[in-house]
Image: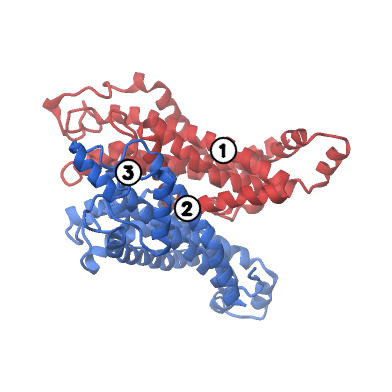
Chain colours: A red, B blue
Amino acid sequence: MEENRFWKRFRRDRAAIASLGIILLLLAVSLFGNWIAPYPFDMQNTLESLSPPSRAHWMGTDELGRDLFSRLIYGTRVSMSVSLLTALSALIFGTLYGAISGYVGGRTDNLLMRAVDVLYALPDLLLIILITVVIGRGILGVFLALSLVGWITVARLIRGEVLRLKELSYIEAARAMGATHGRILLQHILPNTVGVLIVTLTFRIPSAILAESTLSFIGLGLTPPAASWGTLANEGWKALKFYPHLIIFPSLAIFITMLAFNFLGDGLRDALDPSRAEVPGPIAQTEIKRVGA
Amino acid sequence: MILYFIFRRILWAIPVLWVVATVTFLIMHVVPGGPFDKEKKLPPEIKANVEAKYHLDQPIPRQYLLYMKGLVQGDLGPSYKYLGRTVNDVIGDTLPVSVQLGLLALGFAILFGLIAGMISSATAHSLWDRISMFIATAGISTPNFVLGALLIYLLSHRYRLFPPALWEGISNAVLPSIALGLAPAAYIARLTRSSILETNRQDYVRTARSKGLSEGAILFRHILKNAISPIVTIVGPLTAALVTGSFVVEFIFSIPGMGKFFITAVTNRDYPLIMGVTLVYAVLIVIANLLVDILYTLIDPRVKLQ
């Protein structure tokens, strides 16, 4: 019954439904990219370098004559998988950390949260850059750095939820019946945070896309031959004045994807918790850190 | 009372900064390879000399003590890359530029965001409101570099209205301030709207309305006072956002600020500069959060400082 009400509310949000469609399309593109792309992503054809969009090359070509449309499809796979995986791993680790901190409480909670506070004193992107200095760049480095930073927000959020839930009387009842702590946490508390978790995941993904593309854009992220939307935008940036098509298409891809995830997150949150419908999601989520990060 | 609070918060900031300094120091020193390995192969004698000059030949605990000793005296050490200059010199030159840019962007964000949010809430659920909230979500979804590139292409290359780079006068500041401030402006707009709408539902607002006060008087005299506190709280996180945004904006507009130097320092593995800039950022954010807490109590006396 609960799901039905959720679905009814969610369906009314046309922006969220459209966004879900776009996201599914992007997932399909990243899964089946090699069948859609008209050319191999690294095929060079210097005779056709820097040509504007045409029928043969829908988005034009770069200075090595590589087809931008094909490269963008390949970049979709990289950008989407990096952001989905980092959002997921940040979610898992953050949930564990936050749940333990909130559930155990007392001195442990204090200590765990102090550690988080220190990390919170630095902006995300700064931390990410510092971590990539140590573990190196490339897909693995960027993935690890993004995951190592992303969990902090999740941990604070889940801790708050757990603190609230563990005072409820059904938990007391479970304890009176002799349930172990692990059982209470896993069976009774965490299932009730699923709504928050889904919304958090949805908002973490655009943050990850933003962080990865920003990092790659300023030249501290993925290194060639790997190409994400951010590295493509960086290549386009160098030719901005005379060949704007090279930056327009990757930028559009980033913009549309982030917009879709933000609208989907808003829609999910409003449908899951209508009482907070007027509160803009990311802020209610202490997610504000991601503005421009 | 308030002085005592500020004093306690500054005391609390010291361990935070100490941890940040220690962690960055450790991070920078577990990295395989020193700053002088990569470039042209130096003859071993010269390399030894250079490393001795920067104490790199000492054991790590000793290097740490030396760094901390300098730090306590406000000395961030020498820069590896800009020979003959200290990190203090570099930061002294670049920090004012970054602060100017940050303040301009913050001002733009607050002004623009508040006005847009107020108009939106006054016309809630109308077409105008929906369009402006769509634009706000779009603003949040636009990375700084996308917006910056778009502004440069349209307003500098196409129509030569503003210079595309450098930091020499007011006309140089327009595009970067917008590129840096638009996403925060969009946040503030969304937050202002929702905060005003929520306050609007309170009983005392209904009372004011039933007394026959004009809508303007209600908004400015009754609603805004209470609706403003959630907006004040995000100034802290906003500072963090402006810091990270400034890396990108200073990079694409070639502004000689701290963010641009930070990126170059990372590419050059100029460890003392990386650590120095990181510490300055941590200090800035600690100060911003402290200011927010103080402002908060001034606006809303119900909040007690603790």
In the picture of the structure, the residue carrying the numbered disc 1 is: A91
Q: Amino acid at mark 2?
A: Val
Output the chain of dot 1.
Answer: A
Q: Amino acid at mark 3?
A: Asp
Residue B41 bears which disc, if any?
Answer: none
Which residue sits furthest left? A47
In the picture of the structure, the residue carrying the numbered disc 2 is: B20
Camera-near label (1 vs 3) is 3
The quadrant of the rendering that contains the N terminus of chain A is top right
* Percent coordinates x, y for residue A110 in the rendering: 66, 52
Camera-near label (3 vs 2) is 3
Q: Residue drawn at (28%, 47%), measured in percent from left and top?
A: B52
Q: Residue drawn at (22%, 66%), measured in percent from left and top?
A: B171
**Residue A212 can be seen, yes or no:** no
Asked if disc 1 and disc 3 are in contact, CB closer than 8 Å, the reply is no
Q: In this rendering, would B188 be left or right of A156? A: left
Q: In this rendering, would A264 be left or right of B55? A: right
Output the chain of dot 2.
Answer: B
Q: CA distance from mark 3 to mark 2?
A: 24 Å
Relative to B195, say whether B250 is above or below. Answer: above
Between A13 and B298, the residue placed more toward the observer is B298
Is the same chain shared between marks 2 and 1?
no
Relative to A168, say whether A57 is above or below. Answer: above
Quadrant location of residue A134? Answer: top left
Q: Secondary structure at mark 1?
A: helix
In the picture of the structure, the residue carrying the numbered disc 3 is: B57
* Percent coordinates x, y for residue A150 in the rendering: 50, 42
Q: Secondary structure at mark 3?
A: loop
Q: Amino acid at mark 1?
A: Leu
**Residue B244 can be seen, yes or no:** yes
* Percent coordinates x, y for residue A97 in the rendering: 62, 41
Camera-near label (2 vs 1) is 2
